[in-house]
Image: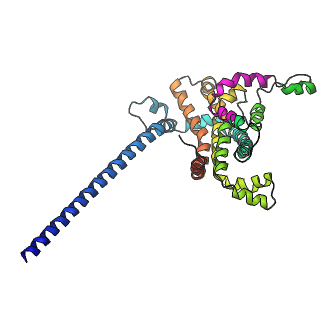
């Protein structure tokens, strides 16, 4: 009986030790998990603050009155908020007219770019043709080459636009296409528009990830290449279409370099009109204080970014899905 009792005691002690060890391991795992979660939270909050803080400061400052701007007690929340900045900025920007023209201009370029880049990306993904690798290498060069390196050639090309002397053959002289949006539309139609290389790459990666069986089934049913592309491949490429659409709209909407290079009218490009808002207020409204002028510029910035924020809020889920499926990282 004593031996049995000692055996039970030893078994109970070993069991208790195992339970204690398991509990210890559980506490260690819980502590590690908590520390990792806390670290991620601090990292996310820190990065978010760095990104959002300047924008938040612009939004808040746009409601500052003159007294708030110079009050040492006001940091983020205005004591006497005012909408005066927005009222004057609306007038000087001719906001609704210019914004309507700008959105029409941006949407037109984005739709053309979407169609052209989708076809080119599909061609690279599915067909074999001579010089395919070299041409796709040119697409990669379009992505990595800084745009300012080709600005002078672009300027001279469209200043005296005469490809293969065809224009001068019909009109008698080369045409100056500057001060019009025509250069942007020509570049976009020819697949060399703003960031076109990136969009071609996105579509190429997406179409390469789709199974070839869906195309083969369409060909077996007697469909041609174009019909298969439009009716089979495009409906499956909705995530990448939304991704490219958002990228294209945002970059076209914010573009100032090409707009200045080709001297596109201020009545079409809101970013150019916003760029002159401070001088307009100084000369027309006789507001000479630079700090007060900046408040009107902040109001203009808020009104300019509002349409893009609204579009992104509605399409963010599809946009993230498209980025993930197209293989874009970093």
| Badge count | 0
Residue 68's x, y, as percent?
45, 33
Quadrant housing residue 153: top right
Tell me which residue sits at (73%, 38%) in the image: 132
- Farthest-out residue, bottom: 1
Residue at figure coordinates x 69%, y 24% from the top left: 151
Query: Which image quarter holds the N terminus?
Result: bottom left
Q: Which residue is pictured at 63% across the width and 23% down the height?
A: 283
Q: Give the range drawn in magenta.
A: 137-161
**Residue 138 location (% of width, % of height):** 69, 33
Q: Horizontal placement of 214 versus 84: left or right?
A: right
Q: Is residue 53 left or right of residue 221?
A: left
| Predominant SS of the magenta segment | helix
Q: Where residue 162 appears, x then y in whole percent?
A: 84, 25
Asked if 223 appears above or below 39 in the picture, the reply is below
Question: Is residue 149 covered in magenta?
Answer: yes
Percent across and percent down for residue 258 are: 69, 29
Question: Observer-nearest residue: 220 or 64?
Answer: 220
């Amino acid at each position: 009986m004593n031996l049995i009792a000692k055996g039970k005691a030893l078994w109970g002690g070993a069991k208790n030790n195992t339970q204690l060890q398991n509990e210890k391991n559980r506490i260690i795992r819980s502590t590690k998990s908590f520390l990792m979660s806390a670290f991620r939270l601090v990292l996310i909050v820190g990065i978010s603050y760095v990104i959002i803080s300047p924008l938040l400061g612009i939004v808040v400052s746009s409601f500052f009155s003159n007294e708030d701007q110079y009050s040492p007690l006001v940091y983020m929340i205005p004591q006497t908020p005012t909408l005066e900045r927005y009222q004057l900025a609306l007038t000087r920007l001719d906001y609704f007219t210019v914004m309507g023209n700008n959105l029409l201009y941006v949407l037109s370029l984005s739709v053309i770019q979407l169609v052209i880049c989708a076809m080119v990306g599909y061609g690279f993904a599915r067909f074999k043709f001579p010089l395919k690798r070299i041409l796709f290498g040119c697409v990669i060069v379009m992505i990595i080459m800084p745009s300012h390196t080709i600005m002078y050639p672009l300027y001279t090309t469209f200043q005296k636009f005469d490809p293969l002397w065809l224009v001068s053959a019909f009109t008698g002289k080369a045409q100056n296409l500057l001060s019009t949006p025509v250069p942007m539309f020509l570049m976009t139609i020819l697949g060399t528009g703003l960031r076109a290389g990136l969009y071609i790459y996105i579509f190429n990666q997406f179409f390469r990830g789709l199974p070839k069986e869906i195309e083969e089934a369409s060909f077996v049913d007697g469909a041609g290449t174009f019909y298969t592309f439009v009716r089979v491949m495009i409906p499956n490429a909705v995530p990448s279409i939304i991704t490219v659409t958002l990228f294209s709209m945002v970059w076209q909407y914010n573009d100032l370099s090409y707009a200045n290079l080709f001297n596109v009218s201020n009545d079409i490009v809101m970013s150019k009109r916003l760029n002159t808002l401070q001088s307009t207020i100084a000369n027309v409204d006789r507001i000479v204080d630079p700090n007060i002028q900046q408040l009107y510029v902040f109001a203009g910035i808020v009104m300019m970014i509002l349409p893009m924020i609204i579009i992104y809020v509605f399409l963010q889920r599809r946009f993230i899905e498209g980025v993930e499926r197209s293989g874009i990282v970093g």
